[in-house]
Amino acid sequence: MASRQPGKAKKLDVTASSRELYGAELRYKREQAGLSLEEMGAMLFITKSHLSNLEVGQRRIQLDMAKELDRILNTDGFFVRNLEAGRSSPHPEFFADVAELETFAAGIWEWEPLLVPGLLQTPAYAAAVIRAYDPVATDDVARERQTARMERAGIFANPKTPRYWAVLDEAVIRRPVGGSTVMAEQLRHLIAMIRRNRIIAQVLPFGAGAHAGMTGPLKLMTFTDDTPMAYYQAQETGSLTDNPATVKRSVLTYDLLGAAALSPEASLTLIEAAAEEYEHGAQVRPAGGGVA
């Protein structure tokens, strides 16, 4: 190991978050121990970029990693004791790591059988979903949840990354969440994102019958300098994994859904037709017949 002078603690802006302070302490202790990012990353079995993101507060530290940090850096339990500060997030605990990973993903692929994906929701649509999920939530709590959801869409400010592709069940555009006016606005937002070439979207029609995604929503994320991740969500819980076998199976599931769905062009036509029907207050009819 190369000899280094102990690093000096970086002076933080007074507006620094608790996570940034936690990450800065990690950097200080690492440099004090004479370890490079590469050396420390190898000890933790993570990449240099992953460790760097932890140190600047862009990634949340998991409990197992906090224990390893205390062991490697001989910090007398500091990282475990202060783990909550390093994991602060406006999102539910089961989803916080996913929202964080979205911010630096190179590509995101989503399958959604019930709702417009959170990243694509309009404020009115999100408000309707939040209120339906928790009818007795206070107005302040509902607004906080809505704001947190809207802030996630900031990733689309970059015109190139992440690459985003969604496969939506036809039920997503048929269920009038929030009423016709809200749905018309929501679908027009999707249409605008598609026409700006910012996202790709496909609709899986009711006529497709049984399909590979019947077990629930799926999100896949890829990264420039990290392993791909798969996320499955259920009621008040979620599973985020980088297990190669699980990710491989999830990719196959997504490919099967894309193959069964309408083409992007046909999907856009269907979404536009549904938006027009909502705008005229008509009952939105399923593609190719069927029960509404």
Image: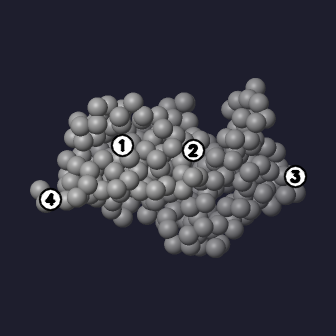
User: What amino acid is labelled 4 in the image?
Assistant: Ser
The vertical placement of 74 against 41, above or below, is above
Across and down, in percent, residue 165 comes to: 51, 61
Q: How far apart are marks 1 and 3 (CA)?
A: 43 Å
Circles 2 and 3: CB atoms closer than 8 Å: no
Mark 1 vs mark 3, foreground winner is 1
Residue under label 2, please give it: 113
Going from N to C along the chain, the mark reached first, 2 or 3, is: 2
Amino acid type at image mark 2 = Pro
Q: How far apart are marks 1 and 4 (CA)?
A: 36 Å
**Looking at the image, is mark 4 or mark 3 earlier in the sequence?**
4
Q: Residue 268 or 94: which is nearer the viewer?
A: 94
The amino acid pointed to by label 1 is Thr
First in sequence: mark 1 vs mark 2: 2
Q: Residues within 10 Å of mark 4 (few under 14, many from 20)?
A: few
- Mark 1 or 3 closer to N-term? 1
- In this rendering, which labeled residue sits more in front, label 1 or label 2? 1
Quadrant of the image occupied by residue 266 = bottom right
Label 1 sits on residue:
241
Mark seen at residue 3: 4
Q: Which residue is drawn at 33% across and 59% down?
A: 49
Sequence-first tag of 2 and 4 = 4
Residue drawn at x 64%, y 73% as measured from the top left: 196
Q: Which residue does the image show at 46% across and 56% down from the upper left?
A: 11
Q: Quick check: can you spot residue 33?
A: yes
Q: Distance between the residues labelled 1 and 2?
A: 21 Å
Provide the residue designation for mark 3. 281
Please provide percent x and percent y for residue 6.
26, 55
